[in-house]
Amino acid sequence: MIEWNKMKEEDVRVVQQIVQRAQEMRPEVDATVLGMDLNAAQITTPMDLQALLEADDYQFAHDVFGVHRHINRLTGEVEHFVPRFAISH
């Protein structure tokens, strides 16, 4: 189960900006689903969202659409994929 209450308010705002940029690249991707995917991933696999937002198109697309493709929507875990902007602990 995804613990949505763990999402930080400032991260939600940056995710919204990331989704807007992603929509410009791939308008066919559902913004609501992508936003939920990125929020869930941020809870389980924290990323430097500001750096991701500011990344070049290649790095940005790799992480955003990689998370979108590899997220387990039941657990929020990113499976078989490591985002480049993941924060290692």
Image (cartoon, helix red, strand yellow):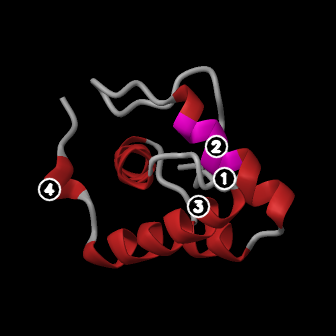
SS of the residue at dot 3?
helix
Give yes or no for contact between labels 2 and 1 (Cβ–Cβ under 8 Å): yes
Residue drawn at point x = 38 percent, y = 44 percent: 33
Q: Amino acid at mark 1?
A: Arg
Nearer to me, 13 or 87: 13
Question: Any mark on residue 80, and which?
Answer: none
Nearer to me, 76 or 18: 18
Q: Quadrant of residue 74?
A: top left
Give yes or no for contact between labels 3 and 4 (Cβ–Cβ under 8 Å): no
* Residue 65 coordinates in the image, percent (x, y): 64, 43
Disc 3 crowd rating (10 Å Cα; few below 14, some 14-19, many 20+) is: some
Question: Any mark on residue 26, and which?
Answer: 1
SS of the residue at dot 2?
helix
Question: Any mark on residue 5, and which?
Answer: 4
Q: Amino acid at mark 2?
A: Phe
For the residues marked 2 and 1, what is the alpha-carbon distance in whole angstroms? 10 Å
Image: 6 above or below 28: below
Nearer to me, 12 or 17: 17
Question: Which is closer to the viewer, label 2 or label 4?
Answer: 2
User: Which residue in the protein does label 3 denote?
Assistant: 23
For the residues marked 3 and 4, what is the alpha-carbon distance in whole angstroms? 26 Å
Q: Amino acid at mark 3?
A: Gln
Give yes or no for contact between labels 2 and 4 (Cβ–Cβ under 8 Å): no
Image: 5 above or below 54: above
Give yes or no for contact between labels 3 and 1 (Cβ–Cβ under 8 Å): yes
Q: Earlier in the sequence, mark 3 or mark 2?
A: 3
Residue drawn at point x = 35 percent, y = 45 percent: 40
